[in-house]
Amino acid sequence: MALSSASPSYLTPIHDKLMPKHVLPPKGGLKKKAPSDGTATPITPSLAVQLSYLHHPRPFKNPNYTKNVNRRAKNLKNVLTAERERERAEREARRLEREEAAKANLNAAAAAGDIPEEAPTYTTIEAPPSLIPHKHLCDITGLEAPYTDPTTGLRFHDKSIYEIVKGLNPSIAKDYLSARGVNSIVK
């Protein structure tokens, strides 16, 4: 950026930053000398300088703010614990409201005779068995098991688990089957 010798005086600090120290300014200096007869026109700042907010105060704080001396700082663990406790209390209150509403609805319906005694509802525990077949799970990993070992009867997820199943002795295979609830004889 080249500055002319007619640059206003408010640009000279910028020029000092832009010009290296080893480069001397042009002879006669960068400032335009004002005529001594007093007829000099006043130097008007540019539009950018007129609109600049650089030297205006920035009131970012509320002047009426007073610090609360009773407030203590909490670490993140305390804040998260308090938040979980508040959410748990809200869930518990909602659950109690639903239970009371369900009791009121069940009592009103039972008084009217709409619901038979043996019909399953959301508040009763007993229900008929599901008609959807249950998924077969791997006896070793608990993942979905599309395969069954023909010798032991253990269900397995993939070939890497099958290698483990082949290496099991019959007593361990029987323990896995009994954990699943199958009491078959291992061949």
Image: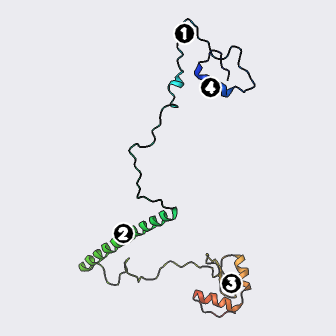
Q: Secondary structure at mark 4?
A: helix
Q: Residue at label 1?
A: 40
Where residue 73 appears, as percent x and y from the top left, is 47, 59
Where residue 61 appears, as percent x and y from the top left, is 44, 43
* Callout 1 crowding tier (Cα within 10 Å): few <14, some 14–19, many ≥20: few
**Residue nearest the viewer, comparing 137 with 44:** 44
N-term mark: 1 or 2: 1
Where residue 39 appears, as percent x and y from the top left, is 53, 7
Q: Secondary structure at mark 1?
A: loop
In contact (CB < 8 Å): disc 4 and disc 2: no
Q: Residue at label 3?
A: 149
N-term mark: 4 or 2: 4
Query: Cα distance, mark 1 to mark 2?
Result: 82 Å
Q: Quadrant of residue 176?
A: bottom right
Pair 1/2: label in front: 1
Q: Amino acid at mark 4?
A: Pro
Which residue corresponds to the image point at 37% horizontal and 72% vertical from the top-left? Answer: 95
Where residue 127 appears, as percent x and y from the top left, is 42, 82
Q: Which mark is residue 94?
A: 2
N-term mark: 3 or 4: 4
Query: Cα distance, mark 4 to mark 1?
Result: 22 Å
Query: Cα distance, mark 1 to mark 3?
Result: 105 Å
N-term mark: 2 or 3: 2
Q: Residue at label 4?
A: 13
Pair 2/3: label in front: 2
On screen, residue 39 above or below 157:
above
Q: Quick check: 121 left or right of 144?
A: left
